[in-house]
Amino acid sequence: MIPNLSSLQKRDLNHVWHPCSQMKDYEEFPPIVIKSGKGIYLYDENGKQYIDAVSSWWVNLFGHSNERISKALSEQAFQLEHVIFANFTHEPAIYLAEKLTQISPEGLTKVFFADNGSSSVEVALKMSFQYHMQKNKPHKTRFMALTDAYHGETIGALSVSGVDLYNKVFQPLLLDTIRAQGPDCYRCPFNQSPEHCTAPCLSFVEEQFKQHHEEISAMIIEPLIQMSAGMKMYPPYYLKGLKDLCVQYDIHLIADEIAVGFGRTGTLFACDQAGITPDFMCLSKGLTGGYLPLSVVLTNEEVYGAFYDDYNTMKAFLHSHSYTGNPLACRVALEVINIFEEEEYLQIIAEKGAFMQELAEKMFCHLPFVGEYRQTGMVGAIELVKDKETKEPFPSEDRIGYKIYRIALENGLLLRPLGNILYFMPPYVITKDEIQTMLELTFEAIMQFFEDSLSEAVLEVE
Ligand SMILES: *Cc1c(COP(=O)(O)O)cnc(C)c1O
C-alpha cells in the first residue's frame, strides 16, 4: 500500500538520502516529519506524540528542548559561535577540558577535541600509532578489536568495527585488524553465569596478544556493553582483566565510551566499574546531551610527552577538523556535566534503572519468544528468539524487530531494534510512570506482532 504523503514528506524524498536506511523501504514507510520535541516526547507534523525510547540514537540525556541547555546554547551563540582552535582558545573549551580531566578516570589529564564519535576513534588510533613510532617501536602498526565491535563508520573506525552489516562491502578498503572473539554472556561458550563469571573468554584475547603483541599498537573496546552488536553486556571483571593483559603485553587500551559514557551503565563512565584507566578514552554522543556534534579523546602525560618536542623533530600530532573545539558545543557539554552533577543523576539513574529492570523482568521474561531480558544501568534489552530452550535466533530476513518497531511507532513509541533485540535507552528525565508506559507499549507491540503472525500462519495452513 502506498501511503498518502504530506508535502514535506514528498519534498524530503525528492532530495534527502537518509542514514542507515534502504531508501526503497521509504516507498511504503515514508520518513516521519518531527516538528518539535519536549522531554522524552517527539511530535510529528500531525501533532502525534512519540516516546523517544532510544534517546534519538543514544545521544539525549536530559530530554529534548531542555531549558537549561537551550539557554546556555543561546547565550553562547550571542557571545562567540566559533574560532580557529590552533593558537587560539576560549573559555568553554578550557573549562570543559578541566572538568573532563576531573571527572574521568585518574591519570587522564590531556584532552584532544574532534567533532563526532568516529573522528575521535580515528584520533585515538592515529595517536597510538604515532606514539609507538616516536618511541622506536615501528613494528606496532596494527590494531586489535573484538568480534561484533562497533566503533563508527569512517574508514579507520570501520576497520576496527566488526559488525558485518556495516563492514562487509568495504572490506577491501579496510585496515587489516586483528580480531578476538568477544564476550557473549547470553550464549556463554563456557556456560558461566554473569554473576559468577571468571572471564575465561579473555583467553581468546590473550591468544592473539601472545601471537601478535609485537605488531599491535592498541586494543579498542566498548566497555561493558557492545551496543550495536545487539546490547551484548558483560561484567566489569572482563574489562579489568583486559587492562591487565594490555599492560602485560605493552599494548594501548582505547576505551570507546562514546555510547556508554555519561551514566548509561550506572556509573559516570563504564571504566569506573572496573576501576581502570585506559590509555585513551573516546567520548561523544551524551557529551552534549544530544544537542550538537562534539567528541574528545582523553589521554595521559606519557602519551602527550612522546609528542612534545622542538618543532623540527616533527613529532607534533597533526590532525584537525574545521570545527575542532567548537565553542557552542563545548558550552553545551559543560552545561550537561553541570546538570549531571548538580541534579545528582547517578542517584536518579540507579533508582529509575532498578524500577525499569524489575518491571521489565516481570512483564517480558515469561513470554514464549523472549530469550532474555538484560539490563545495565539505564540500558535494557529484550532478546527475541525462535526457541527459548536452544536460544536459536529468528532468521534475520524475517525482520521481526523491524516489524515490531513499525507497530510500536503506530502506537506512539519510538524503539529502534537491533535485529531481534528490542532495547530501551530513554533520556534520564523519564519518570517512573513513563517507564511503565514505555514498557507496556512495547509489550503490546510484541503481542500484536505475534498474534498477527500466528493468525497468518493459521491462514496459510488453511
Ligand atoms: C555511535 C558510536 C560511534 C560513532 O560515533 P558517530 O558520532 O556516530 O560517528 C563509535 N563508537 C560507539 C561505541 C558508538 O556507539
Image (tube, rainbow, N blue to C red):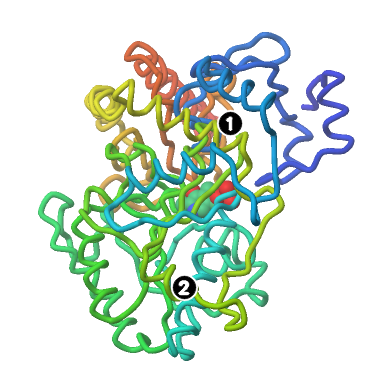
Q: Quadrant of the image for the C terminus?
A: top right
| Residue drawn where x is 47% and y is 33% of the image | 334
Quadrant of residue 74 in the image? top right
Using the rendered image of the protein, determine whether residue 306 is visible from the camera's viewpoint: yes
Q: Nearer the viewer, residue 179 or 320?
A: 320
- Write down the residue under mark 2: 128
Query: Which residue in the rendered view is the most extreme toward the top?
Result: 47
Label 1 residue near ligand 1, CB within 8 Å = no
Q: Is residue 453 left or right of residue 260?
A: right
| Residue drawn where x is 34% and y is 65% of the image | 182
Percent x, y of residue 124: 49, 64
Mark 1 element type: loop
**Separation of residues labelled 1 and 2 (CA atoms):** 29 Å
Q: Is residue 263 left or right of residue 67?
A: left
Q: Sequence order check: which comes first, mark 1 or mark 2?
A: 2
Q: Is residue 35 left or right of residue 113?
A: right
| Residue drawn where x is 29% and y is 41% of the image | 372
Give the answer, above or below, for where 191 lies relative to 418: below
Percent x, y of residue 438: 42, 20
| Residue drawn where x is 64% and y is 66% of the image | 155
Amino acid at pointer 2: Ser
Give the answer, above or below, for where 445 lies relative to 92: above
